[in-house]
Image (spheres, rainbow, N blue to C red):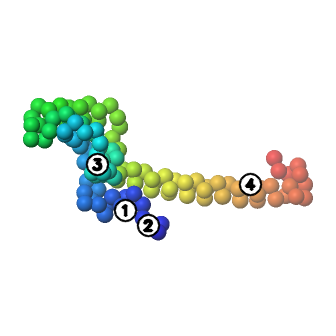
């Protein structure tokens, strides 16, 4: 149960972690129709009024150029990078917890004489 996370689910999908960067939807529809919902969570979506048979290279290139402009405007993030960041964050939190416990133990040890003499803890 604890082993099932976003990274694991992503590896079980048809795209196996190679999520699309750009999704072009033709026919004037501005919805995905439940197509690659999970995989497209970070994709640039381009909606065109043209139907697929009438799609021309320049219309497609417009989507590519829009994607490139959008990608330059935001920092790149990938599921693997997010997973690595989450793992690093968990490890960092664990190190922080241990460090704080050690500080608490040292402080308690340093202040133990205070029980006998309150002025000893300074």
Q: Disc 4 and disc 2: Cα gap in Å? A: 37 Å
Mark 1 nearby-residue class (10 Å; few <14, some 14–19, many ≥20) = few
Q: Residue at x 82, y 50 (%)?
A: 121
- Disc 3 vs disc 4: Cβ atoms closer than 8 Å? no
The image shows residue 72 at horizontal and vertical percentages of 29, 33
Nearer the viewer's eye, disc 2 or disc 3? 3
Mark 4 nearby-residue class (10 Å; few <14, some 14–19, many ≥20) = few
Q: Disc 2 and disc 1: Cα gap in Å? A: 8 Å
User: Residue 33: which numbered mark, if any?
Assistant: 3
Mark 4 lies on residue:
107
The image shows residue 108 at horizontal and vertical percentages of 76, 57
Mark 2 lies on residue:
3
Q: Disc 2 and disc 3: Cα gap in Å? A: 30 Å
Q: Residue at x 45, y 53 (%)?
A: 86
> Which numbered disc, 2 or 1, marks the residue that appears first in the sequence?
2
Mark 1 lies on residue:
8
Q: Residue furthest bottom?
A: 1
């Amino acid at each position: 149960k604890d082993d099932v996370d976003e990274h694991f689910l992503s590896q079980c999908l048809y795209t196996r972690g190679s999520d699309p960067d750009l999704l072009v939807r033709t026919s004037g529809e501005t919805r995905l129709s439940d197509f690659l919902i999970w995989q497209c969570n970070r994709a640039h979506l381009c909606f065109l009024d043209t139907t697929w048979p009438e799609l021309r290279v320049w219309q497609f290139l417009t989507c590519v150029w829009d994607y490139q402009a959008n990608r330059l405007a935001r920092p790149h993030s990938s599921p693997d990078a997010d997973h690595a960041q989450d793992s690093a964050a968990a490890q960092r939190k664990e190190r922080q917890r241990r460090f704080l416990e050690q500080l608490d133990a040292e402080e308690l040890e340093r202040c133990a004489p205070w029980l006998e003499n309150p002025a000893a803890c300074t």
